[in-house]
Image: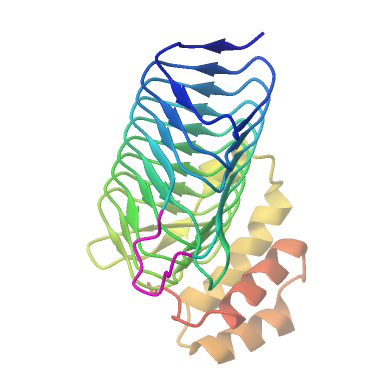
Amino acid sequence: MNNISDKAVISPDAVIGKDVSIGPFSIIESGVDIGNNAEIHSNVLIHSGTNIDSGVRVFHSAILGAEPQDLKYKGEKTKLEIGENTVIREFATISRGTVAHGKTVIGKKCYIMSYVHIPHDSVIGNNVIIANMVNMGGHVVIGDWAVIGGMVGIHQFTRIGAHSFIAFGVRVTQDVPPYILAGGTQLAYKGLNIIGLKRRGFTDEQIRDIKNAYNLIYGSEYNISDALKAVKDSVNMTEEVKNIIAFIEQSERGIIRK
């Protein structure tokens, strides 16, 4: 049974699932689709083109699916998609896409804290944690299980690899490869995200192979292309090592250094 405040403003063209709660003074525009068991707190604004999956919780004064903050946006119909069981905390703002990608995507079971801004055409994987006051440019891609510390600024078109951990208060201007810790005044490689990997069930053998790959990439005098060749020649080609190689080979902004 739905629990919808009589002080909420909901378009008759919005689609509201079962067992949804919507708090007072929230506004749900036409073209919004809210899945079952979602929880929308007070003063939330959800714009047209937003699809919210089941079990999502949106806290006080968040704004979802707003028009992109991008001069190339010309009013085209675009989307924001939010995966099931994601939590969006107070005053977070998430824009929908532009014609470049068509949508902004937030994965399943993410935790997006207060005052985070996720802009147009960004793609956030599953189980990602983004701490308070993280702000990013458009077209950012963040892999599954990544953790972004508070007050981090992320440059547009930057990619952050799966299972990586970004320290508090840094600037991310180049790609951050998967499975690592990154921090420092000038953002740099600080080792593997050992605690995170063990918590997620990575074996000692998997971690060893990841470490062997990064020892060549970051712990040698090789340039990047030579380091990747050395990894291919001497490290077990596990799925994780293949992910590292593919991520670096596909980097357009270059990766952070040690």
Q: In this figure, what is the number of numbered marks? A: 0
Image height check: is 201 above or below 181?
above
Quarter of the image containing the N terminus? Answer: top right
**Residue 59, located in which quarter of the rendered image?**
top left
Give coordinates of residue 243: x percent, y percent.
Answer: 68, 67
Q: Residue furthest front?
A: 12
* Color scheme of the displayed model: rainbow
Image height check: is 209 above or below 117?
below
Give coordinates of residue 158: x percent, y percent.
Answer: 44, 69
Between 5 and 258, the one nearer to me in the picture: 5
Residue occupying the point 46% across, 11% down = 5
Image height check: is 229 above or below 184?
below
Residue occupying the point 55% across, 59% down = 78
Give coordinates of residue 175: x percent, y percent.
Answer: 45, 71
Between 1 and 129, the one nearer to me in the picture: 1
Q: Main secondary structure of the magenta part?
A: loop
Q: Is residue 80 magenta?
A: no
Q: What segment carries the magenta color?
A: 67-75
Quarter of the image containing the C terminus? Answer: bottom left
Residue occupying the point 53% across, 73% down = 100
Drawn side of residue 191 relative to residue 19, left or right: left
**Residue 150, located in which quarter of the rendered image?**
top left
Residue occupying the point 55% across, 60% down = 77
Between 38 and 152, the one nearer to me in the picture: 38
Image height check: is 179 above or below 91?
below
